[in-house]
Image (tube, rainbow, N blue to C red):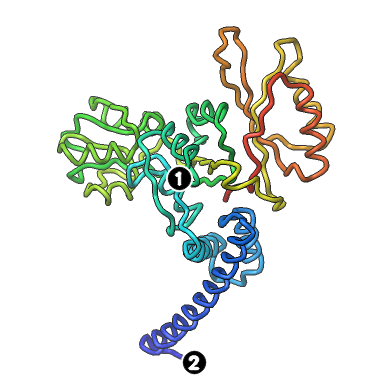
Amino acid sequence: MATTLPELRIKIDALDLELLALLNQRAMLAHEVGEIKRVDRSPVFRPDRETQVITNLQSINPGPLRPNGVAIIWREIMSACRALEAAQRVAYLGPAGTFSEQAALQFFGSSIERVPCVSIDEVFRATAAGSAEFGVVPVENSSEGVVSRSLDLLLNSPLHIVGETSFLVRHSLLRLTPTLDGIEVVYAHPQALAQCQDWLTTHLPHAERRAASSNAEGARLAATNSTWAAIASERAGSEYGLHVASYAIQDDAFNRTRFAVICLPQTLPAPEVTGHDCVSLIVSVPNKPGAVHDLLVPLKAHGVSMTRFESRPARSGQWEYYFYIDLQGHPSQLHVAAALEALQGLCAFYKVLGTYPVGE
């Protein structure tokens, strides 16, 4: 048994060669799968299949690798293999270094063609027009609630949700020097400014807060003036040559953001059942007493859990609302299908936004 550092390194080098050979074998098999898919005109990317692969590996993993480590490693392996068939073009709120870019990489892996966009609206446009196959948009934050623009765009968009991902968001204050002295302006996306308002009030009470189209755009601007700072990720700081003046300044230590993965139905149909699935809906009901209560009755009757319920104004001038609902399950399951059918019969407006595996 190896006991010295040089001996251990020799063993690791030998294992790396074995891993490389096995990974290339896997890549060749994936290429064969791609050829079959090309003939069958099947989608290259199957989030349900990839979720099942990772979940199965995590369940049989003997350790010491942690479950999250297994997920990260295999996501990158599958991403690299997918790129042999075709690198997915993925749109997200740019520029480089945004949390949206991080979400895209977390969901698809690094072997994608990145399509940074100047706004959430542009992410929807690029994906609907086909200049990107998929889009990644923020939909909910644990501190500030829903991202209203994303929900409003989903209402009339031809795109549907095929996946989701979320992660803890750690905001850093970035600038050209590593101190808080002399900061006159702080740039960030309005959501980030809201998520850090208590910290800013305490530590930079006199600094002007300016909204940017994204946190990374704020970081780019902060790199042009020594009296400006930005709230963004450390990744954005590295991208624009900024120092971290203060780390983790978000008011909520468990600040988490959820992102939806969207595409045209012809790009990818609704993923198949995985056992850990979600159905997202937009509905409206007639304006009468008890109408909202009636929405819950079919869910209870058929044993379907509701995991999210949000309202948005219908902008009709009549104080009417759309309701955004997430349900646990998949429409291929009989009890879910029965609940959806009964629910639809109660609604003045009914749209399925997507069916997809629950995110990590």
Image position, residue 107 (x, y; %): 51, 52
Q: Which mark is residue 50?
A: none
**Residue 69 seen from this side:** no
Q: Tell me the amino acid under the disc marked 2.
A: Met
The residue that label 2 is drawn on is 1
Q: Is residue 56 above or below residue 302?
A: below
Q: Is residue 31 above or below residue 294?
A: below
Image position, residue 75 (x, y; %): 52, 61
Q: Is residue 279 above or below residue 57?
A: above
In this picture, residue 250 sits left or right of residue 347: left
Q: Residues within 10 Å of mark 2 (few under 14, many from 20)?
A: few
Image position, residue 303 (x, y; %): 81, 37
For the residues bearing labels 1 and 2, Cβ distance under 8 angstroms: no
Q: Is residue 82 above or below residue 259?
A: below
The residue drawn where x is 66% and y is 69% is: 60
Image position, residue 202 (x, y; %): 31, 30
Please state which of the two labelled residues, at mark 1 or mark 2, is closer to the viewer.
Answer: 1
Q: Nearer the viewer, residue 360 or 44?
A: 44
Q: Tell me the amino acid under the disc marked 1.
A: Ala
The residue drawn where x is 44% and y is 86% is: 14
**Corner quadrant of residue 265:** top right
Mark count: 2
Local SS, label 2: loop
The residue drawn where x is 28% and y is 27% is: 210
The residue that label 1 is drawn on is 132
The residue drawn where x is 41% and y is 34% is: 122
Give the Cα distance between marks 1 and 2.
Answer: 52 Å
